[in-house]
Image (cartoon, helix red, strand yellow):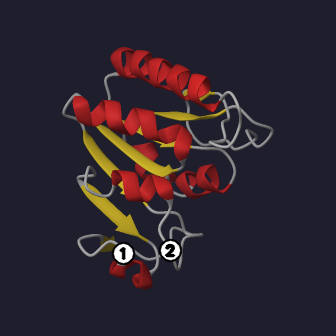
Amino acid sequence: MKICFACSSGGHLEEISRLNKIADKYNHFLITEKSSFNQNSFGKKKYYVPQTNRREILFVFKFIYIFFKSFIILLKEKPDIVISTGALSSYPICIISKFFGKKLIYIESFARCDRPSLTGRLLYKKADLFIVQWEEMLKFYPTAIYGGGIF
């Protein structure tokens, strides 16, 4: 079994790096944003996509590029499962993987304790397993699993 870990940089990368015991057991790779936070040692094989913000002028073009790059990575690596902690830069690989019949596990960010994230709202119905880290989030995601904090 091969796992794709997908997340944006910063706190999302820090959260997914807490899954290192899972990563150590399986063939895996990481897709994350290229940023100054990339000192994290999680993942033996890494792919980088541009850092993006939906409020920037070139957002649409960057997002389309991320979709194409994610598609190429998926074809090359052929993961069985995608595990994501969000945010926006991980959305393309999650959607593409579902299109190809792969399993998707989404973990809503630990920072989201009182309202859902945009990526969480977009992927809630698509994920095979949706995990929240705060019990209060079950009111937004009633079929989610409360898994407690990754930290």
- Could you tell me which quadrant the N terminus lies in? top left
Residue 1 visible here: no
Rendered residue at 50%/50% (across/down): 86
Residue in the picture at 36% in, 75% down: 140
Cα separation between marks 2 and 1: 8 Å
Q: What residue is drawn where x is 50% and y is 61%? A: 117
Question: What kind of residue is marked 1?
Answer: Phe
Q: Quadrant of residue 103?
A: top left
Residue 108 drawn at (x, y percent): 45, 63
Most extreme residue toward the bottom is: 136
The x, y position of residue 81, in whole percent, is 30, 40
Pointer 2 local density, CA inside 10 Å: few below 14, some 14–19, many at least 20: few
- What is the three-letter code of the residue carrying label 2? Arg
**With 134 as the anchor, is 101 left or right in this view?**
left
Residue 46 in which image quadrant: top right
Q: Quadrant of residue 151?
A: bottom right
The dot on residue 115 is: 2
User: 20 or 47, which is in the foreground?
Assistant: 47
Asked whether 69 or 13 is in front, the reply is 69
Q: Which disc number belongs to residue 24?
A: none
Q: Secondary structure at mark 1?
A: loop
Residue 74 seen in this snapshot: yes
Q: Are marks 2 and 1 in contact (CB under 8 Å)?
A: yes
Residue 11 picture location, percent across and down: 66, 57
Mark 1 lies on residue: 140
Locate residue 135, reporting x and y percent.
Answer: 40, 83
Q: Is residue 132 positioned above or below 135 on the image?
A: above
